[in-house]
Image (spheres, coloured by chain):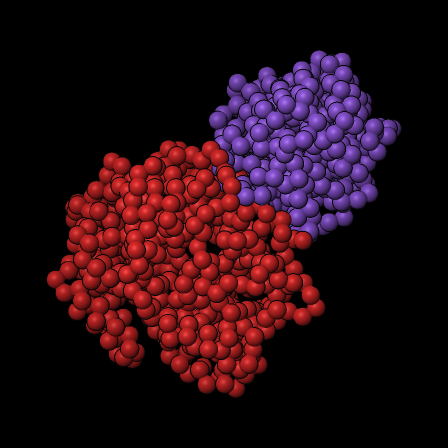
Amino acid sequence: MPDPVRLTVDGLTVSVPAGSMVSTAVVSAGASGFRQSVTGEARGPLCGMGICFECRVTIDGRAHCKSCQVVCAEGMEITVGQAPRDVAGPPAGLPRQLVVAPAGRPQARGPAPQYDTLVIGAGPAGLAAACRAAECGAHVAIIDDNLRPGGQIWRADISKRSSPADAWVRMAQDRSVEVIAGARVFAAPEAKCLAVEIPEGELALSYRNLILATGARERFLPFPGWTLPNVMGAGGLQALAKSGLPVKGKKVIVAGSGPLLLAVARYMKDHGADLRLLAEQADQASLLRFALGLAAHPGKLAQAIGFRAGLLGTRYLTSCWPVSAQGSEKLESVTLHRGGRTWTEPCDYLACGFGLIPNTEVAALLGCAMSQTGVAVNEFQETSVAGVYSAGEATGIGGLDLALAEGEIAGYAAAGKHETAKQRFGARESHRRFAVALERAFALRDELKALAQADTMVCRCEDVTLGRLRQFGGWRDAKLHSRCGMGPCQGRVCGGAVEFVLGWKAASVRPPLFPARVASLRASGE
Amino acid sequence: MGKGYDVAIAGGGIVGAACAAECAAGGLRVVVIEPGPVGGGATAAGMGHIVVMDDSPAQIALTNYSRTLWMQLAPELPADVEYVSAGTLWVAADAEEMAEVERKRGVYESIGVRSEVLDAKALAEAEPNLRPGLAGALRVPDDAVVYPPCAARFLLDRARAHGAEVRVGAAAAALTADGIQLRDGAFVPAGITVNATGTWAPELTPGIEVRKRKGHLVITDRYPQWVRHQLVELGYLKSAHSISSDSVAFNVQPRKTGQLLIGSSRQFGAEHSGVDAPILSRMLRRAEAYMPGISELSAIRTWTGFRAATPDKLPLIGPVAANPRLWLATGHEGLGITTSLGTGRLLADQVLRRPTAIPFEPYLPGRKREEALHA
């Protein structure tokens, strides 16, 4: 192992394993809150993947840095928990790129596009798409806002050298796929060109074909106490643990809905957490039907059996969900509900997610039509916009195997190899049936709509309560008059909750898709 | 209540809301027809700068009068209107613009508007994030900032408190001398109808000279105290009032939240409401030229909106010449938030045949057009 890294958090020197994210250092320093909300509440990380903006801290004088996406560097100075005052000089310790993009700003606006195929998202769908397109001779680049490829499901563990994404990453490298890490699409300033922010600045990437493999994020539902530090997403806690957050000996409750809970619970147990309980809101009968259906998918069945075996001795409760979280400065206990009974468990970390929501923002910006489940695509994974494809969770939640099949089809189709693409149709069809079963089994129950109380925060960026939202007639009205969804997460956290609880659909998508430096926004239009 | 209303107002933006509040407070039976959401047009898109502008004598009179009304109203405004008396700094880049500062100061002094000249050093102390080397500024301390959608809602609430009816979700299909024809087929009878629909006004009152003038804004994350005044370049008048071409100007506003609003741009003939990347870039480059550090701030959203522009840059307030029962309250261009209160008061005074605090003739729709100072 390389030497640990030393840095300061509010003046206190801490030492963390090399490769740890700044979020780990903040926790190691014993800080309970990472930032103060606009009404003065202490907040900590929620999503663990750069979506929620709750883990923002000041790094070397630069305000509003997402601590879950910046790697600790020797001598960094972190400030937490206060409103930022100054924005100083060049930021230090910014994440390194896996493969450095061409120096300077590429000449994207020349006559020929830089890439035959540009892939957004280096999760399973994106990696498969990039490899297949490159194997057909296309010049391919794949970008991802994470520092290592793999997406969320194959997120690399900093304590391990290998990652489940390695085989695909090696294949991509063997086929000369350019991998641009730590890069986030924020605008589409002209046709066939995307503006991308990287730590060093802004890139313009032009393409002939585009494959959107933008994955999914967790759906969070508001309940009293859900804004307390250490109440996190299920995937959120796992992501933070993989980037160095110690969970050994911590009392963990995993709750919400969906197969992700099993994987997270298993990970927590394997890493020494005191896993108290797994609470799945779906009922036993639905899960049983789903489990029987797994027989048609031997791989999934084996995986499920594996997870369950690993969780032997753990309480696994169906028809059970959290109704509130308590704590003074951070989480101390969780109150759960099951079959008319309500009780309280002590807890250090609540990992809580209610299924997944496809990330469709880039597709929406490009004008792609949407389906009931996500980005609408044809049999070759092409969207309503010619030359723009989409694969994986962005088109609808379906899991790893479906993502791989869709990615391969999109990659082949983008490279013009439609006959080869057709060979994957059968696999895709079978995995799609699994996706439908999945959705049915883990459908969210109506009782969850009643968890949030009038004084429960719904919008965590602007601190807007459910009671305030109920004064308005719809999403735009609420946005204009309460600023709900107008903070840096741009409604990615509250949007899913508002849709489920109030039935409002979020409106238009505009650049920047993610907060971007003013300089990047300016450069994107020049 | 009888069958009809005294005044039926189409449009629940800040101008319609101010007209409703004033008419209702004057004892008139008022109805507002707003398809929704309240303040969802130019009101939502604007910065919310309460400012005295000296482009023409009539503009000075209306903006100054309106600002006085805002200052009187300030103690009653709820917190979500976010009224902050931040003041405006008209920033002079060089000696030539400093001469303009002096001229402007003289104009303001002549009408009793407080202002003070800042030299280069005083400017740097007042706003440390401006670039070094600027010549100075004119500080207008009583100018202010509000959050316009909540201001519009507050004014509608006032109107309701005086008995007005506000129909959100109802859309006007046509305005007649007898009232408002709604899209759902219903008819709202009224003694006077007021077209306060901003850029949509020509659709309901064909033939009026109101054009759409597109603007862009960017909002940042929270950086409290990074900017303290509304900062506007003195060249603003030149660029803002160039009728012929697209223009940008340095115009940055501190919000009560600590966020910064970065403007501004003006485009005629741009119908598409999407963000226009090249003009956004020009606008941001202008801001960076005055405040280099702004480059590193995090921009969280951009949006566009359309101002209702008239040829002589003055709003249309009063009855249309052809029909004394059909009134207009539109054409406020980039000053609608400031001049909403003055518009409402002038309109109500005319309807109620009360004396007006400032002459109303310059804003009558049938006026003879005068060329403005910076045409």
Residue B199 in the image, given as x and y percentages of width and height: 71, 41
Q: Is residue A127 visible?
A: yes
Q: Is residue A44 above or below residue B189?
A: below
Q: Residue at x 53, y 18 (%)?
A: B75
Q: Depth check: give the residue in front, A318 or B257.
A: B257
- In the displayed image of the protein, which residue is found farthest to the left? A313
Q: Would residue A210 appear left or right of A17 to someone viewing this image?
A: right
Quadrant of the image containing the N terminus of chain A? bottom left
Q: Residue at x 20, y 62 (%)?
A: A270
Tell me what hue chain B is rendered in. Answer: purple
Q: Residue furthest front?
A: A3
Quadrant assignment, res A237: bottom left
Question: Which one is in front, A442 or A143?
Answer: A143
Q: Is residue B131 left or right of residue B56?
A: left
Asked if residue B56 is positioned above or below residue A143 in the image, the reply reads above
Query: Does the rendering let one see residue A439?
Result: no
Report which quarter residue B334 is drawn in.
top right
The answer to whether residue B191 is above or below residue A321 is above
Q: Is residue B9 left or right of residue A153?
A: right
Q: Which chain is red?
A: A
- Which residue is at 37% across, 33% downward? A40
Looking at the picture, tell me which residue is in the foreground, A170 or B49: A170
Q: Residue B287, how many percent across, how many down?
A: 64, 39
Q: Residue at x 61, y 26 (%)?
A: B124
